[in-house]
Image (spheres, rainbow, N blue to C red):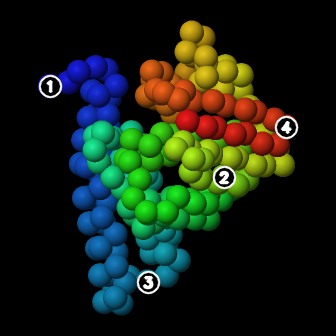
Amino acid sequence: MVGDDTTLAALIGSRICHDLISPIGAIGNGLELLSMAGDVQGPEVALMSESVASANARIRFFRIAYGLAPADSLLGRAEVARVIDDTFRGGRLSVVWMPEGDQPRQAVKIAFLCLQCLESAMPHGGEAVVRRDGPGWRIEGDAARLRIEPRLWGPLSNPDTILELTSSDVQFGVLRQIVRDRTPPLLVETGAQRIVMRF
């Protein structure tokens, strides 16, 4: 039974990602077979393969960030690191995942949403580091140039503020909804070249 809008949204996210991952994987396998057979080669095939790999990585990232995260579910470090490496490889944002061992899926979900928020604030690139901070989590984003929009970042740690979203900002809305009643709450500190998010 669906208990609230957050759970329903997570179920929708899980379903969409589940339905997309198989055909995307099949396309990748087909391209690999064509390449091995020598029937199709060249930069066009390489471009298609890179695009399929990128789409596959994004879907796996979205499945964690927007999918259902049962309270007792864990994610292994190897799986999380692989998803992060595949998602951000070749991009402007470099991500370092520090936590060792298995971690609660719900916490990883929040960390992934934080990374997406940081990515939107670093259009010219930067580095994000995810680490455990005692019993909590700390995500730091550093960049020479940050684009911090108060309409998005302010409401994250102030649930009484109205959050105005566009489709490209949905991660801010989902993150605020998830951490709204969380203890400890999400804390955000912004500076000229650094953003720190703690939960």
Residue located beneath label 2 in the image: 128
Asked if residue 48 is positioned above or below residue 150 in the image, the reply reads: below
The span from disc 2 to disc 4 (Cα, nearest Å) is 15 Å
N-terminal label among 3 and 4? 3
Which one is in front in this view, the residue at disc 3 or the one at disc 4?
A: 4
Residue type indicated by callout 3:
Gln
Picture residue at 48% right of the left edge, 21% below the top: 180
In this rendering, would 80 be left or right of 161? left
Asked if marks 2 and 4 touch (Cβ < 8 Å), the reply is: no
**Mark closer to the chain start, 1 or 4:** 1
- Residue wearing tag 3: 41
- The residue tagged 4 is 192
Image x and y of residue 110, in percent: 48, 39
| Secondary structure at numbered mark 2 | strand
Q: Residues within 10 Å of mark 1 (few under 14, many from 20)?
A: few
Q: Are marks 1 and 4 in contact (CB under 8 Å)?
A: no
Residue 1, numbered label: 1
How far is disc 2 from disc 3 in space, using C-alphas? 36 Å
Tell me the element at label 3: loop
Q: Calculate the distance from the C-alpha at mark 3 to the C-alpha at mark 1.
A: 50 Å
